[in-house]
Image: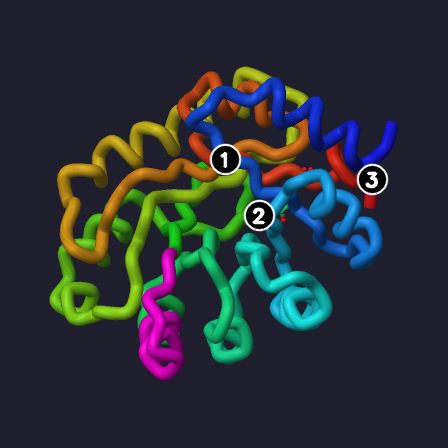
Amino acid sequence: MSIKNNLQDLKQSLPEQVTLVAVSKTKPVVEIMEAYDAGQRIFGENKVQELVEKYEDMPKDIEWHMIGHVQTNKIKYMAPFIHMVHSIDRMKSLKELNKQALANERIISCLLQIKIAEEDSKFGMSLSEAQEILQSEAFFNMKNIVIKGVMGMATFTEDQEQIETEFKRLKSVFTELKPLISEHFQPEIISMGMSGDYALAIECGSTMIRVGSHIFGSR
Ligand SMILES: *Cc1c(COP(=O)(O)O)cnc(C)c1O
């Protein structure tokens, strides 16, 4: 199967309300261009340096999404062009994103990464941390960001029931946060589901899936 076929088959199987982020990390520009030529315009990367290089080398109508752990000191490099940051896991990153968005005279969209997995290795905040941020004076004054929802990663396991429990947890966190809607919190997006579990994620309420190897092959 070619990248183009993989992409087209996947897109055809998706419900209308689900947005596909094609995760292109580690893949060379020629391969990503195959997906671009097949119509894909939303790509996800997990390292800032790779993201910046690909941004520079590729067409400018691509929406780049940052899906990997955010190091605060690197936010400035992606702030001029990044479309959405999925992985905001603490107040410090949110503050820096707002600062760099202001410096670039932009309003940048982001998601709060919620820890839904059992594994300690996964990043993310708790429901109460997210509630605290959304109700804080500091957040109220961040005029250059819009939080559009939540993102989560399930435990790396074969256990479908555990994955389902974790996805349902993210959906319920989203539902709990929703009433805190404000000018800078416009809850619309639940980013969950990867190559191995996107169908289950969609059943559990995902509106944005992040799929890499299923499109581009294994890394
Ligand atoms: C790599 C990655 C994905 C995509 O993983 P695949 O299994 O290749 O689909 C999704 N989300 C995040 C945060 C990733 O780092």
Going from the N terminus, do you reach mark 1 or mark 2 first? 1
Three-letter amino acid code at the position of disc 1:
Thr
Which quadrant of the structure image shows residue 116? top left
The residue singled out by tag 3 in the image is 218
**Magenta segment: does it hold 100?**
yes
Determine the residue positioned at 22% across, 34% down: 176
Does any atom of ligand 1 lie closer than 8 Å to the CB of label 3? yes
- Of the image marks 1 and 3, the number of the one nearer the N terminus: 1
In the picture of the structure, the residue carrying the numbered disc 1 is: 19
Residue, far bottom: 103
In front: 11, or 112?
11
Q: Secondary structure at mark 1?
A: strand
**Could you say whether the residue bearing mark 2 is in a helix, strand or loop?**
strand
Q: Is residue 3 left or right of residue 12?
A: right
Q: Which-is-in-front pick, marks 1 and 3?
A: 1
Q: Tag 3's secondary structure? A: loop
Vertical position of residue 112 compared to residue 187: above or below: below
* Three-letter code for the amino acid on which mark 2 is drawn: Ile
Q: Earlier in the sequence, mark 3 or mark 2?
A: 2
Q: Residue at x 39, y 68 (%)?
A: 93
Residue span colored magenta? 97-109
The structure residue drawn at horizontal position 47% and vertical position 17%, both measured from the top left corner, is 203
Which residue shows up at 76% across the image and 51% down it? 33
- Name the amino acid, label 3: Ser
Residue placed under numbered mark 2 in the picture? 42
Mark 1 CB in 8 Å range of ligand 1? Answer: no
Asked whether the beta carbons under mark 1 and mark 2 sit within 8 Å of each other, the answer is: yes
Q: Is residue 76 shown in magenta?
A: no
Q: Quadrant of the N terminus?
A: top right
Answer above or below: position of 188 versus 60: above
